[in-house]
Image (tube, rainbow, N blue to C red):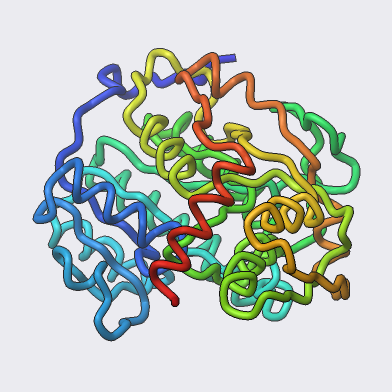
Amino acid sequence: MRTSFPERQDMTRDFKRILVTGALGQIGSELTAELRSRYGSDNVTASDIKTVKESPVMEGGPWTVLDVTDPVAVEEAVLRTKADAVFHMAAILSATGEQNPQLCWKVNMDGTINILEAARKQDLARVIIPSSIAAFGPETPRDSTPQETVLRPRTMYGVTKVSGELICDYYARKYGLDVRGLRYPGIISSETLPGGGTTDYAVDIYYKAVLEGRYTCFVREDTMLPMMYMPDCIKATLDLAEADFDSLVHHSDFNVGALSMTAGDIAASIRKHIPDFQVEYRPDYRQAIADTWPKSVNDSAARAEWGWEPDWDLDSMTADMLERLRSRLL
């Protein structure tokens, strides 16, 4: 059922000035670049808790250091940047979260609530807070995982993502806040290294193929998970952000699919370009996490409500990844 919004009728409002949290992360860095291309560099402020020398994100437009667990700092950043939209990408990911679950909860949940509160107080036009396939668990159907299904994750990261979906829906229903999100699969990028997720192998394997011609994979060869090439990830995020609100039935929990392949499938695709590429499979603690996640997702709601459709398949992604990495690393 569509959520009722009694306090605000003009739900789809234009936004012009954007604050991005977690802008130095794998997705945040490339999302920031695309947002600046679309909305103008001066209108998109990038933020993160850390700084990086010679960062294109820091040098390409307005920049601020921001700890999303500090509610005062978050609201001050929204006010200082005059943002009317926030893309909240700051998070502790699954594998790192299992090493420090208390930090994972603090960053992911306190950060999300702080963003929502600042957005509510300042009446922002739009908030984008992604979720993840980590919201699912072993009781969830693993093939073509439904949009509406059991959400009982086994990781702290997954717990924060389910909780995040629920608190976002609460703010939408209670305060009429236009908050949207999608359940990201594993994201593969040629530009930025991943930051401690269970699907990091799907990125690392390409780097090692180019640089060393061999890779030791931390999941089994037959491990199948939903994946997405970064250009499709950015496209999905912005397509949802810019969709007409009246077309949306769901808000904070869209399944989005693109690729579903095993670790062995990725290796085989790479061998079409690097025939001698060798992979050894040595599963570690991340295998147990991967075994609780979907093999594929049903994203019919995203396709129907805002026209989602991916552009990349496995082989086209592999060819592009290898070309870009060779150009940059060799």
Image-quadrant location for residue 195 = bottom right
Q: What is the quadrant of the C terminus in the image?
A: bottom left
Q: Which of 124 and 299 lies nearest the eye of the viewer?
A: 299
Seen in the picture, residue 52 relative to 185 is either above or below; the reply is below
In the image, residue 138 lies at what x, y percent?
89, 47
Residue 29 position in % (x across, y down): 36, 62
Q: Residue furthest front?
A: 275
**Closer to us: 30 or 132:** 30
Residue in front for this viewpoint, 234 or 288: 234
Residue 280 drawn at (x, y percent)? 85, 73
Residue located 71% across and 64% down the image: 198
Q: Does 115 sit left or right of 212 as displayed?
A: left
Relative to 104, residue 266 above or below: above
Looking at this rendering, what residue extends furthest in the bottom direction? 53
Total labels: the figure holds: 0
Q: Residue 162 vs residue 171: left or right? A: right
- Residue at 14% of width from left, 58% of height from top? 81
Residue at the image position 55 percent from the left and 46 percent from the top: 317
Q: Which residue is pictured at 58% across the width and 51% down the height?
A: 318
Residue 151 image-quadrant placement: top right
Whether 203 is drawn above or below 237: the answer is below
| Horizontal relation, residue 97 to residue 311: left or right | right
In this picture, residue 210 sits left or right of residue 272: left
Q: Position of residue 75 (x, y in %)?
A: 26, 61
